Amino acid sequence: MDLIIEGIFKAFHLVFGGDAEIWAITWLSLKVSGSATLIALIMGIPLGIALATARFPGRPLIVALVNTGMDFPPVVVGLFVSITLWRSGPLGFLNLIYTPTAMVVAQVIIALPIVASLTMAAFQTLNPKLGLQIMGIGASKPQLLWLLCKEARLPMLAAVMAGFGGVISEVGSVMMVGGNIKGQTRVLTTATVLETQMGNFGTAIALGLILLALAFAVNLLLTKIQQREQIRWPKPS
Amino acid sequence: MRVKIVLRILPVVLISFLALSSPLSAGAPANKSVILATTTSTQDSGLLDLLIPVFEKTGYIIKTIAVGTGQALAMGKRGDADVLLTHAPAAEMPLVEEGWLSHRVQFMHNDFIVVGPESDPAKLGGLKSVAQALRKIAERKAAFISRGDDSGTHKMEKELWRAAGIEPGGGWHIEAGQGMGATLRIASEKSAYTLTDRSTYLNLRKTLALKILLEGDPPLLNRYSVMLVNPAKHPRVNSEGGRAFHSWLLSDEALNLIKGFGKDRFGQSLFFLDPVKQ
């Protein structure tokens, strides 16, 4: 019990004492997971829309793969990305292993199926007649797509939250492809593992609290946007 | 509507993340980045945190990958590292002889110790021989946590069991599969014995319910060596950078840092220097 109290005190001291290393680690976590989420959105939203609206051969297989990918264990992603990026691996000439870029690559692979799958689900909940109606008033194809995206934007925000939440909190892949190198690839999750191993529980708890606060802040922002546009149900009389 | 503004700002924020992260990928020139594969004890004890920033003043950037010695040697053999710092002479020598590694210099040592709970169920207290101690643990079937990760410490442990004439197995011999810090933590929580290097134990001692039960037996010597990965076998190895770290580690500047390391916190050195022959 003493340990926990001591840890929490240490946590506040580190967070509000302006410890430069802790903030550098936090910033790197945000950068890596933020970039990975953004790339996953750029790739995953069109993929999800295509899977929801178009019919083409092989579609059921891709849908099954995307849905399986949602549960893809980060360590397995880490393993495959490591083997590929090692100098002895097929993409070793890129010199990417143990860099933040390698961590972004791994996290994109983790977040992409989550974004694609939830986007697909968001579009599938739209009324199919909506498309016909929009076409009926003479909208072009890009206009149609834009209007459908606007209709589906609330559930799509859930895709952003789930994607970011999935990668900011994972430790398995960033540990393997980043190497947890001090000042270069150490992020909140891997630093927590190391500090726990080194017996610095106060620092470990501090890092854990920052991670929680970060995930909470991002989700709070997105939830606010999402909830503000909620349909107001009439009160039962 | 404010919501719309937020929705418009969101992509801008995300794109700026991407823009800010791009200089990272560019980073320093490839030949400035040196991969050091090493045992966990050099990192968990805090030694590398002392040494690396001083070396990096030369302009090189060290990427420390702290894994077990077995994994570190495998990385060297595959060419996925430039310079190695490990502690398993018996595993290092064959790789040097086969030409995968070169310039092996044994330059520092400390020792392994057997630690266990205060209650000491197998009664190791007062023993002088590690073989005798391990036999007592096996006889009592007292819980023993093994690293179980092919690290240098695990290789040493297997060697000690073999020398004691015991084939460890059964429920009392527990394989953690983790680094030294995590293994000590498990031993402490389960009131079990374990074999550890002295530096990691001293560093964590305050948070562990474990005490030293056996030390000083000659087979427990823990010998650290630095080696270069042979660039002739792997053209992508940064041999210049590896060489720079190798020779700096054996310089007076580094050796003095190693010699003094731990004196302020523990009142004793954690690593002792060997007479260096190159």
Image: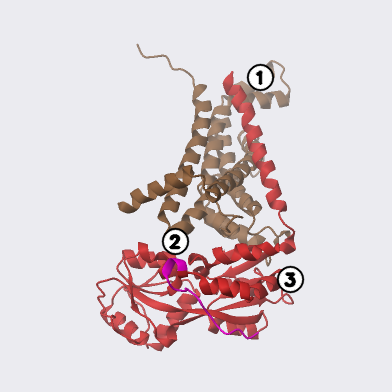
Q: Indicate left or right for B89 with B135 as reference.
A: right
* SS at mark 2 in the image: helix
Q: Which chain is tinted red?
A: B
Secondary structure beneath disc 3? helix
- As drawn, the chain in brown is A
What label does residue A134 carry, if any?
Answer: 1
Mark 2 and mark 1 on one chain:
yes
Q: Is residue B258 visible?
A: yes
- Would you place residue A183 above or below residue B87 in this image? above
Q: Is residue A70 visible?
A: no
Residue A237 % position (x, y): 34, 11
Which residue does the image show at 59% across and 26% down from the upper left? B6
Marks 3/2: CA distance?
33 Å
Task: Name the residue carrying label 3.
Answer: B240
Q: Amino acid at mark 1?
A: Ile
Q: Residue at x 34, y 48 (%)?
A: A5
Q: Residue at x 47, y 53 (%)?
A: A192
* In the image: residue B124, left or right of residue A61: left
Q: Decide whether residue B273 is among the magenta residues.
A: yes
Kind of residue sitting beneath label 2: Gln
**Which range of residues does the magenta coloring cover?**
B264-278
Of the pair A18 and B244, the residue shown nearer to us = A18
Q: Amino acid at mark 3?
A: Glu
**Which image quarter: residue A132?**
top right
Label 2 sits on residue: A197
